[in-house]
Image (spheres, rainbow, N blue to C red):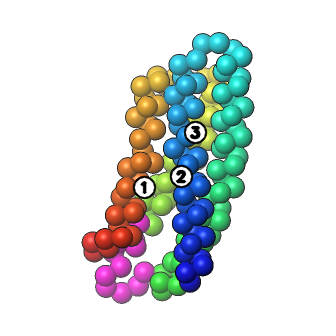
Amino acid sequence: MPWIKALHIVFITSWFAGLFYLPRILVNLAQETETLATQRLLLMARKLYRFMSLLAIPAILFGGWLWLGYGIGKGPGNGWLHAKLFLVILLIGYHHACGSLLKKFELGVNKRSHTWYRWFNEVPVVLLLAIVMLVVVKPF
């Protein structure tokens, strides 16, 4: 199980790198007015989204493997695991929201300000903090 946990941590870390950077590109896209720069940012965002999607798959699979190893969270004292899984589902939703927002930029229909994207950019930080606290502290 330590190998699975190590691989899970590596892929989660890599996935989060993309979750931290892609929204930052979206902030820049929301501010950009030049067509050439916009096209370059869109190319970067598309490639990053595709790459981070590939990283998310083994992260989730290794996490599922660990979850099965824990007995699927049955019994007392596993409330932290249920809370963590809920946050992981939110994280997957955030990942898909990033893809949806990228599509809107590609179609030229973005209706949000760069300030909104700056706040949106903070969501994975909060989720990571909460998930790590749940896993390490196991408060319930």
Where residue 22 is drawn, which disc sits there?
Answer: 3
Give the image quarter of residue 28.
top right
Q: Tag 2, which secondary structure? A: helix
**Badge 3: few (under 14), some or many (20 or more) residues near its Cα, within 10 Å?**
many
**From the viewer's perspective, is 41 left or right of 78?**
right
Q: Is residue 81 part of the magenta span, yes or no? A: yes
Disc 1 target residue: 128
Q: CA distance from mark 3 to mark 1?
A: 16 Å
Specify the segment rendered in magenta.
73-84
Image location of residue 47, percent across then percent down? 71, 40
Q: Tag 3, which secondary structure? A: helix
Q: Amino acid at mark 1?
A: Leu
- Farthest left residue in view: 139
Residue 106 vertical placement versus 100 (above, below): above
- Farthest top residue in view: 34
Residue name at image x 41 percent, y 85 percent: 74
Image location of residue 103, percent across then percent down? 65, 34
Q: Amino acid at mark 3?
A: Leu
Q: Is residue 116 visible?
A: yes
Q: Amino acid at mark 2?
A: Phe
Quadrant location, the C terminus: bottom left
Q: N-terminal of the two: label 3 or label 2?
A: 2
Marks 2 and 1: CB-CB under 8 Å?
yes
Disc 2 target residue: 16
